Image (cartoon, rainbow, N blue to C red):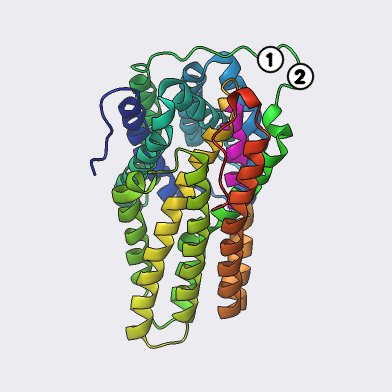
Amino acid sequence: MRLLPEPGPSRTLALSTLINTVGRGTWLTASALFLTRSVGLTVAQVGVALTLTALVSLVASAPMGYLADRLGPRGLQLAALIASAGCTAALVAVRSFAGFLVVGVLMAVADSASRGARGALIAGAVPADQRVRTRAYLRAVTNVGISVGAVLAGFALAVDTRGAYVTLILLDCLTYLLAAVVLLRLPAVPPVPAPTHGPRLIALRDRPFLAFTVLDGLMSMHFSLTNIALPLWIAGHTHAPRWLVSACLLVNTVVVVLFQVRASRGTEELTGAGRAARRAGAFIGVACVLFAAAGGVPAAVAVPLLLAGALVHVVGELWHAAAGWGVSFGLAPAHAHGQYQGAYGMGMQLGSMVAPVVVTTLAIGWGVPGWLLLGGSFLLLGVLVPPVVRWAARTRPQAAAPEPVPAG
């Protein structure tokens, strides 16, 4: 139940992540107000810029992962953290939409490099049977770090001056640099030579792996349920008090911190990962039904339904995250962990791009039928993952074939 793993590479990665995500939490909390109130951008301009930078991040994910394999993941991770610090500091000088877009694009490339390098770094520095567990620790400390950063940002939001926002930006910049310093304690992972023949970006030619990536990315739309759809549903379509939005988010954060590592047990092998994805789809589907049932009923009924839905949803979220790590590590060749982790990240980027439109149209625009359609979609996505993983396992090179995934 402890937050940090045993001393060694996993703990170093966790400490670096914890420091960095405190800064990220401050930026995520205050970015919209800084850009609109201090820089002077419109809400529409912020939305367009974030969409474009998300697209850049999606396109850059696999190539940056390839570079992590070829150049060495620790070096690329350090370079990405330093570049991110520079981009963050540059936000202080932004005065226009064009300036923010330039900084945002550079930050998106650095973020893509960091994600691909981190996956390859875990694969190279952590024993195979501990990789998923390490990712679980990193997700738990990420939630703690962002929560702490959000609290710190609250003080600046209360002051609501440019000086306060600039302080938060510089704090975020500092955490990138401190995270890089901590990462220096990790032994360097040597680069892996590229194959002498054949295509370089093999992850983008691996059809079963890409099929899993698309399914997993579409499943990741469920993250927008608690961040976007549920607050709008509670405020506009239920009789529950609006403070319940915070309560549901708190349930999510606490459960992830306390139980993500435990939920990852058994997902180190493809068999367990496929089953976890199926369970995730079922639980998230049930959560959608509970959310739908809260619409229009008295507050005394709506409140327990919404809290139960939040709890059931986060259980599915834990299994979905663990399943993705198990499959993405389990299917990657030893010489291509970086690009496979980068390609896996493309699915998450795809989900984050389409989710706002999909979940608001269905859950808020269509109401109860939309919630039920969402629930059925998540259930179907979870059911489809195990056969796709079995297909992917059969296509691995025989010499390094993973354990077959049984039908059950």
Identify which residue, 49 or 357, lies in the foreground: 357
Label 1, label 2: how far apart the Cα atoms are: 7 Å
Left or right of residue 355: residue 122: left
User: Which stretch did the figure color magenta?
Assistant: 338-352
Q: Position of residue 11 (x, y in %)?
A: 30, 28
Q: Position of residue 389 (x, y in %)?
A: 61, 44
Q: Is residue 130 above or below residue 195?
A: below
Q: Quadrant of residue 239?
A: bottom left
- Residue drawn where x is 32% and y is 59% of the image: 250
| Residue 400 counted in the magenta span | no
- Residue drawn where x is 76% and y is 19% of the image: 198
Instruction: Identify residue type, mark 1.
Output: Pro
Instruction: Identify residue type, mark 2.
Output: Gly
Left or right of residue 138: residue 227: right
Residue that label 2 marks: 198
Location of the N terminus (image quadrant): top left
Question: How many residues crowd around disc 2 within 10 Å: few (fewer than 14), some, or many (20 or more)?
Answer: few
Q: Is residue 153 visible?
A: no
Q: Position of residue 241 (x, y in %)?
A: 35, 77
Q: Position of residue 70 (x, y in %)?
A: 60, 16
Q: Is residue 261 above or below residue 181?
A: below
Question: How many residues crowd around disc 1 within 10 Å: few (fewer than 14), some, or many (20 or more)?
Answer: few
Residue that label 1 marks: 195
Secondary structure mostly seen in the magenta stretch: helix
Left or right of residue 303: residue 285: right
Identify which residue, 288 or 44, lies in the foreground: 288
Name the residue furthest left.
Answer: 2
Identify which residue, 175 or 254, lies in the foreground: 254
Identify which residue, 292 or 266, lies in the foreground: 266
Verify CB contact (< 8 Å) between mark 1 and mark 2. yes
